[in-house]
Structure formats: C-alpha cells, structure tokens
Amino acid sequence: MKRHQQRPLAISMGTLVLPLLFLLLTSTATIQKQHNSLAERRENASVQPSPLPTAEPSPTVPPKQARIVVIDAGHGNADPGAAGASGKEEKEYTLAVAQAVYAELKADSRFELHLTRGDDSYVELLSRAALAEELHASALVSIHGNTFTSRSVSGTETYFYDDNSSELAGLIHSRLLEAMHFRDRGVRRNDWKILTHSSMPAVLTEIGYLTNPQEEAAMLAEDGIRRAAQAIAAALTEFFFPAA
C-alpha cells in the first residue's frame, strides 16, 4: 500500500521538475542573450565616430574705417547753371572738377568716394543730400562756379551751414585760394538746401566767377581744373587725417 502511494508522488515531482528546469534554462539563455545584445550595443556605440566639433564663428570683421565722401557736381542737364564769359556752362565745369577730385583721391584707401552725378544728368537738390545721408557720409562737398552781371567781379567764396562744417569749409577755402590765386571773398554761412539737409560736414564752394573772362579762362584750363581738384582733395585729407 505504501509503495503504491509513493509512485504517484514520483510522477508528480518529475512532472514539476522538468518544466522548472526548462524555464530556468530558457531564462538563463534569455538573460545571456540580453546581456550579449547590450554588450554589443555598447561596443558598437564605442566605435562610432564622434561628432565633428562645432566650428568657431569667424571673427567679426571690423567696421570699415574709410571716410565716405560725396562729391557733388553742381547743376546738370536742363539746369546748366551759370553761363560763362565764353558761353561755356557751369554744369560742364563742375562735372570736370568733381571727376578730377575723384581721380585725386580714388587711390587712397582711406576714402570711399561717391559722385552725385557722373554725366550730364540732373539730380534734385534734396536727393543729393539724401544720397549722402543714405551712405552715412563723412562729408559732402558741392562744387560750383559763380556768376554776376558785372564781368569785373571775381574771387572764391565758400559756404557752410552747421557749425560742424565750418572747419572743413575753412580748409577747402584756404587751399583753393593757394591753388587758384583768386580774390578772397570769404567763408560764409548760408542756408543752401544741400547744406541744411545734410547732417555731416557739408560745404558748397564757388571756386571762381565764370562771368569774369580772366577767371573763367584759368578755371576752365586743364591745369586750372587739376589745381582746384588737388586743393579740395588736400583739404579733405587734412580734415580727416591731420598730420601728427
């Protein structure tokens, strides 16, 4: 009787042990597989190339140091300006001098030059000042030739409006007197539109009287144009870059 009761117990234990053993082996294999998978991921991660370092931004380019100068050739096109003693028109003279000033300074990297007109075109007075404002110009120089009913009147006149323009006006005037040897008619304050609408140092120069035959001849001569241009260029250089 006892032996008969022990058989069912042995069968029951065997039935239980085998599944437990299978479960244990399966779990061990799963754990090992997971461990191997994790190790593999770690190993793969360790050999991945590291990301490229972020490039440092380029150094900020320092602001441009060049002095921006707007050179204005007075009049133009349908506005001829003064009629000279010889019949030549002021607009031709002013353009020639403006272009000569440009040529004098263009090789100097300390200057950035702009012409309000480079041909026989007309630019509104306020547009000339607006151009200088838009460019944040350091200076504006408007070039003219004078006129009067009497042919005997002669001389150089230079105009400014704001006090910040008086020094440049004085320099341009002085240099023109040295170069042209015309009568000194002084530096004066006046409310010409191109001056009153310019916040930077702005000067209008009447180099000489085109209605005076002798003065006109000197002004229109190739050498006269060159000397006037050199005088204005020298004054601008002295104003912005005074000798140490």
Image (cartoon, rainbow, N blue to C red):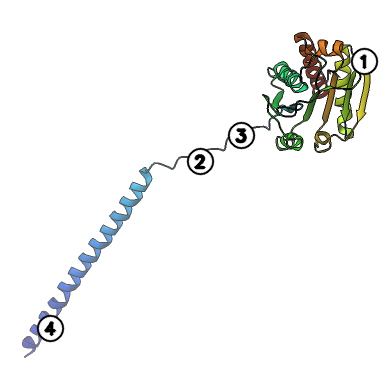
Q: CA distance from mark 1 to mark 2?
A: 76 Å
Residue where numbered disc 4 is placed: 9
**First-in-chain label (3 vs 1):** 3
Q: CA distance from mark 4 to mark 1?
A: 147 Å
**Do the CB atoms of the residues marked 2 and 3 lie less than 8 Å apart?**
no
Q: CA distance from mark 2 to mark 3?
A: 15 Å
Give, as a three-letter code, the residue at label 1.
Answer: Ser
Q: Residue at x 80, y 38 (%)?
A: 197
**Kind of element beneath mark 1:** loop
Q: Position of residue 19 (x, y in %)?
A: 17, 73
Residue where numbered disc 2 is placed: 54
Q: Between 188 and 230, which is closer to the camera in this rendering? A: 188
| Crowd around label 4: few <14 · some 14–19 · many ≥20 (10 Å) | few
Q: Nearer the viewer, mark 4 or mark 1?
A: 1
Question: In the image, which disc is placed on residue 152?
Answer: 1
Residue where numbered disc 3 is placed: 59
Q: Nearer the viewer, mark 1 or mark 2?
A: 1
Q: Nearer the viewer, mark 3 or mark 1?
A: 1
